[in-house]
Each structure stands twice: as C-alpha cells, then as structure tokens.
Image (tube, helix red, strand yellow):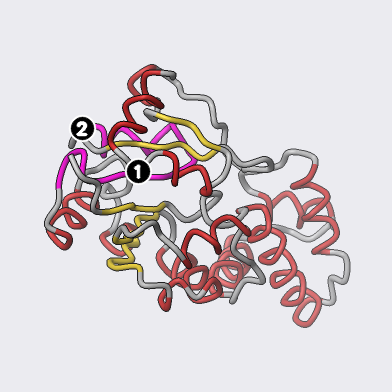
Amino acid sequence: MRLTTIVLDLDDTLYLERDYVRSGIVAVGDWMRKRRGAADFAYTAQALWDAGQRGHLFDATLAQLGITPDRSLVEALIVTYRAHLPDIHLAPDAAAFLADPLGSRLALITDGPPVAQLRKIEALRLDRAGIDPLIRTGVWGDGFGKPHPRAFRMVEARHGGSGAQMIYVADNPAKDFLGPRTLGWRTVQIDRDGAVHSRTAPSERHRADVTISSLAELEKLVAPAAWELAVGGV
C-alpha cells in the first residue's frame, strides 16, 4: 500500500530534549536570581540533572540551596519553565528531512504540557514547516496522550489515509507505538544518542517495526518493497 503520511513525534525525535531541559533550567535560574537572589540555582539544578535527578528537580535544587521548597514557589518555577521560549534547534537530519519529506504529507503528535509543547513548536518553527495537523494531546486533558488513539484517528481523518499508508516516527517505546500499531500503522523508532527516555521496549507489543538512528534513513523505507525488507530484518 502506498505511503501517504509521515507522522512525527517531537521530543528526542526532531531535537534533543536534553537541550530543552538546559534551556528551561537557565530560564528558571534567571527567575530565581531576579526574585530571590539565588545566583546558583541554574548551576545546581543542572548538576542535579546531570547526576540523574529527574522527578522533583526544582524541589531538590531548592533544598540543596537551603531554600524551603514551598508549593507556591515550586509552582511558579514550573510555570516559568513551561512558558519560556526555549533555546533549541532541529537536529541536522530533522531539518534536512523537513525540507524534503520524500513526497509525503506530514503531521505531528506530541504529548506533554500544552503550553510547553507550543513553545517548542514555535522555537523550532514547526508551524511554518508544512506540518498539518500539529497535535498537542495535552490540550484535551488527562487520558488522551499516547497510546490513546484519538490523535492518530484525527490524522487519518485529516489526511484521508489509514493503516499502512501511515508511518509514525517517535523515540519512546514505552508509549509511542501501541496506539498506531493498533490502527495498523507502520512504526519507526528513532534512537538518538543522548535521548532522555529509555529506548528499550518493555514488551514485544511495544516495539516499533523498524529502528533507525537518523531521519535520513527514512528514505530507504518509504517504498513498499524496501519496508518489507527492513521489517523482515528486524
């Protein structure tokens, strides 16, 4: 069946999420320096992140600096983090692919806080890249993120395609591929060095059909015969 649409994830698919984290830490550090006189916040938070701290990063940073991590302060830091315009850039292979998407239509499906995801889209200028729709599942509230099929069905309706006409390219096998596989889509995991989330599938049904390390490799997969050969080699 002829491919019509390539649907992309955002974080660690088109750019490195760790760069967003660094940018957000800098923004929150500026906020703390100006409002609380905490000059070392960004340095401390980044050091904790680099050491493996993930959940409650701001609470841990405040505690290390001897500042009580009260709820109102932490919430203000989270708002600042999510609302900032990040200093992030497309991966070189992603920029090249978006400039020449192999004759396919493009769409994007991304989970996460909707304001944060919008700011990433703006920073990467994806709203000017011919991608339609740009779906932020967070705008629908809890329960509609991947693997829920709502976003994938929306793309099918917008593009008039289904099943093997669609490819979803994403990085996180824990949640990214269950939904599109249920609908019969082709699935491709991109495994970038430096990605934040584990790229190991928790079970066979979570696995993508094919794994690549660069979007440049998609060119080898779009032809039906090439796809069957690649899947057969997995």
Residue 50 within the magenta-colored segment of the rendering: no
Name the residue: 39% across, 53% down. Answer: 8
Is 211 displayed left or right of 72 in the figure?
left
Q: CA distance from mark 2 to mark 1?
A: 20 Å
The picture quadrant where one finds residue 131 is bottom left
**Residue type, numbered disc 1:** Val
The residue wearing badge 1 is: 222
Q: Farthest residue to the bottom: give it.
A: 34
Crowd tier of the residue under label 1, counting other residues whose Cα lies within 10 Å: few below 14, some 14–19, many 20 or above? many
**Residue type, numbered disc 2:** Thr
Is 5 displayed left or right of 68 in the figure?
left
Residue 23 image offset from top left, x and y in percent: 69, 66
Is 149 displayed left or right of 171 in the figure?
left
Name the residue: 28% across, 36% down. Answer: 224
Crowd tier of the residue under label 2, counting other residues whose Cα lies within 10 Å: few below 14, some 14–19, many 20 or above? few
Name the residue: 55% across, 64% down. Answer: 95
Which type of secondary structure does the marked residue at label 1 adopt?
A: loop
The residue wearing badge 2 is: 182
Residue 16 image offset from top left, x and y in percent: 62, 53
Which segment did they paint magenta?
162-181
Residue 162 image offset from top left, x and y in percent: 15, 45
